[in-house]
Amino acid sequence: MSSDSAPLHSSAVIDEAVQTLRNGGLVAIPTETVYGLAADARNPEAIKKIFAAKGRPSNHPLIVHLAAPDKFDQTQIDWVALLAPWARDVSEDALKLINQFWPGPLTLVFKKDKSVLNELTGGQDTVAIRAPAHPIAKELLRKFKGAVAAPSANRFGKVSPTSAADVREEFEGMLDLMVLDGGDCKVGIESTIVDFSSGEGAVLLRPGAITPGEILSKTGVKVYLPGENKTSNEEKVLPKVSGSLKAHYAPTTPLRLYASGRVLDALSEFPDTKSRVAVAVWDSESSLSHDGHPSARFEEVEVSSDSTVFASRLYRCLRDLDQQGWDLILFPEPPAGEEWDGVRDRLQRACFGSGPSSNNHESN
Ligand code: AMP
Ligand code: MG
């Protein structure tokens, strides 16, 4: 289902989730990007439970999720007032992005209000905030009358969950977790993150469904790539971000990318004649020829040549392939073009972290 359809939960279930959050518990929630593991953003003990459940290092900050008020006319929402308890120095440009894209898959980073917990920001003086668009997340947040901290609901470094079943599987036997089922996530990859905290323009920290080109055309605001804005202080250390680890979003089966028409080169890394290899191929292309490689047993999986559709199915596809016992998964390198940047970023990190060892999560 899509996140536009009616919520799958009765209001009694949402009320129970609200109560769990108020009691300092964790609730897994659907959002339009991926499923989140939510806790009361003002409760330090609750936040610690997120880090413990995920196995996430405590200096990796979490995104605050705010309720989008239920207004027919979205331009009437007073975001300045809603952000005041969390963020300082919210610029006119930041408000243009907010008015255009919230609620939606865009996270903004600001200087934090002093009341914001260090547990939440990983000790940094900045805070990351977004208002999710999924109807269940919106209803929960409105009833909760607060904000939740919510990273993706998966163990650290692993593939993010895009269905309620994925979340349950991720924490099976470890955690008795309340999971709100909102169907499959529409966007399928994590939010775009734009940093306004330097006060010197907007900088892209993580690519996602909303691209700098779309932001420029809809708001007139230029979003720089890290290091591109020469007027900003080049010595500035970028905030620590899980999404910036070289290895992340990774399956346990080795995953590699192949350049267009170069499947055999990628396979030569795996000369074992008994290897079973899953090869993702563009739906727009004819089937691969398997001639010339005596070893591996192939199976082809079609992936969409539309970047939005590709993103919405990427993690589903990686999770499913990971469970099928392949020796190797091959994906085609995404084409050039910023609409593919979010997908390319996730695939590259997934490759780097893939394989049976989970100890290769080194930082870049
Ligand atoms: P996720 O990995 O989806 O849980 O999102 C967390 C990401 O949000 C981090 O890896 C950062 O990219 C970003 N983020 C969260 N909090 C902050 C913060 N205080 N300062 C800068 N970036 C942040
Ligand atoms: Mg994550």
Image: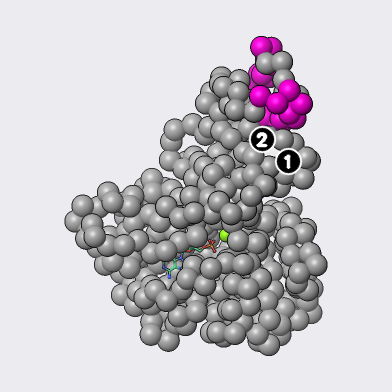
Query: Mark 1 Cα within 10 Å, few/some/many (few <14, many 20+)?
Result: some
Name the residue at 59% across, 72% down. Answer: 51
Name the residue at 74% across, 57% down. Answer: 166
- Residue 18 sits in quarter: bottom right
Residue 62 visible, this orientation: no
Question: Of 288 and 51, which appears nearest the observer?
Answer: 51
Secondary structure character of the magenta stretch overall = loop
Asked whether mark 1 lies closer than 8 Å to ligand 2, one says: no
Question: Of 194 and 264, which appears nearest the observer?
Answer: 264
In this rendering, is residue 349 above or below 156? above
Residue 222, horizontal then vertical, whole percent? 30, 52
Whether residues under marks 2 and 1 lie with C-beta atoms below 8 angstroms apart, the answer is: yes
| Upstream in sequence: badge 2 or badge 1 | 1
Q: On the image, numbered disc 2 is attached to which residue? A: 329
Q: Residue furthest left?
A: 231
Residue type, mark 2 in image: Ile
Name the residue at 19% across, 56% down. Answer: 231
Residue type, mark 1 in image: Leu
Determine if the magenta segment contains residue 337: no
Magenta-drawn segment: 271-292
- The answer to whether 41 appears left or right of 213 in the picture is right
Name the residue at 55% across, 84% down. Answer: 44
Residue 105, horizontal then vertical, whole percent? 52, 58
- Residue 240 sits in quarter: bottom left
Residue 203, horizontal then vertical, whole percent? 34, 56
Q: On the image, numbered disc 1 is attached to which residue? A: 321
In this rendering, is residue 77 above or below 23? above
- Residue 285 sits in quarter: top right
Q: Secondary structure at mark 1?
A: helix
- Please state the quadrant of the image where ligand 2 appears: bottom right
Determine if the magenta segment contains residue 272: yes
Residue 277 visible, this orientation: yes
